[in-house]
Amino acid sequence: MSPGLLDDVFPPPVRARLEETADLLDPSLISEFDSPDAVRALASAEVLLTGWGCPPVDAGLLGRTPRLRAVIHAAGTVKTFLSPAAFDRGITVSSAAAANAVPVAEYTLAAIIMGAKRVFPLAGLYRARRTHRTGADLDRQHWLGTHGLTVGVVGASRIGRRVIELLQVVLDAEVLLYDPYVGAAEAELLGVTRTDLDTLVATSDVVSVHAPDTPETRGIIDARRIGLMRPGTLLVNTARGTLVDTEALTGHLVSGRLDAVLDVTAPEPLPAGHPLWDLPNVLLTPHLAGAQGNEVGRLGALAVDELTRYARGEPFAHPVHRADLGRIA
């Protein structure tokens, strides 16, 4: 094994634990699965440690891994690369989605606070005028502030639950929740008010989207529901761009009726000439809410913990089950 492959990714204690439990396939071989070294490594592999950008683990690859017993994904969703055939073979699967949820939720909280204080449009005015804000500016921007916010959370995913927790600890916010899989008893434990989606979008100061991308959720924030939002509502989307009707939203943002922080869009990125790029009441970010920089260490540490559990014959702490595929991101 080449320790240098780990030096820039894992801190020394994590790297040492990984070196005790795994042999590494040189990353240069990953795109060359027909090379002799890759064929030999795959034929003897018992565990695949995967990450963002890994090739599909499909029926073809599974046919070349007769000893494979587990897939440990050191990133978020497995739906983008892992075939259901893996579950059919009895392969156990783990994901670091719980670790990736932490920075996404932190980004969301920051977006809610900054957006509720109208930081983005007012900072633009300040930069342009080089003068202090005025009362007229505040009225025109539907000034909110963070005291007593009503925040509507769409989806009690890992990230959605973490956002709820942060809102309750950091802000004195009332949290509304729409999630068809959450019953009254669970909502009470979460400390939220369960409601239908129309009521949520019509009564929230902030609507924060945390649902998975499934046939049932695509376009769930559609033109009609966007129209139900009150003037000054802030829409935060750190989930998937396909959940929001971008073109319907655009008209409300261009008019200044709504504000938005969009880490994801549909399409992604938006066309170069799209009006959302230049609006003062919109913050577009390049799908960066998930783990970046030193945050990636959390994902690696979780994956190493799961690999260690596997080597000890213990069940995964963060398993992914086939039944989950229809309702996870």
Image: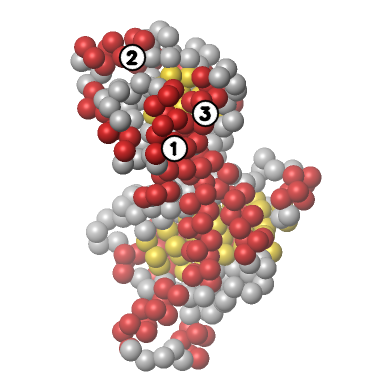
Q: Which residue is mark 2?
A: 42
| Horizontal side, residue 148 vs residue 288: left or right | right
* Three-letter amino acid code of the residue under disc 3: Glu
Q: Amino acid at mark 2?
A: Leu
The answer to which of 101 and 45 lies nearer the viewer is 45
Quarter of the figure with residue 35: top left
Q: Is residue 190 visible?
A: yes
Closer to the camera in the image, 280 or 315 = 315
Query: First in sequence: mark 2 or mark 1?
Result: 1
- Residue highlighted by disc 1: 13
Identify the mark nearer the N-term, 1 or 3: 1
Name the N-terminal-most of marks 2 and 3.
2
Instruction: Residue at 38%, 14% (x, y): give it.
Output: 45
Q: CA distance from mark 1 to mark 3?
A: 15 Å
Quadrant of image for the N terminus: top left
Q: Are marks 2 and 1 in contact (CB under 8 Å)?
A: no
Q: Are marks 1 and 3 in contact (CB under 8 Å)?
A: no
The dot on residue 306 is: 3
- The one nearer the camera, 9 or 14, is 14
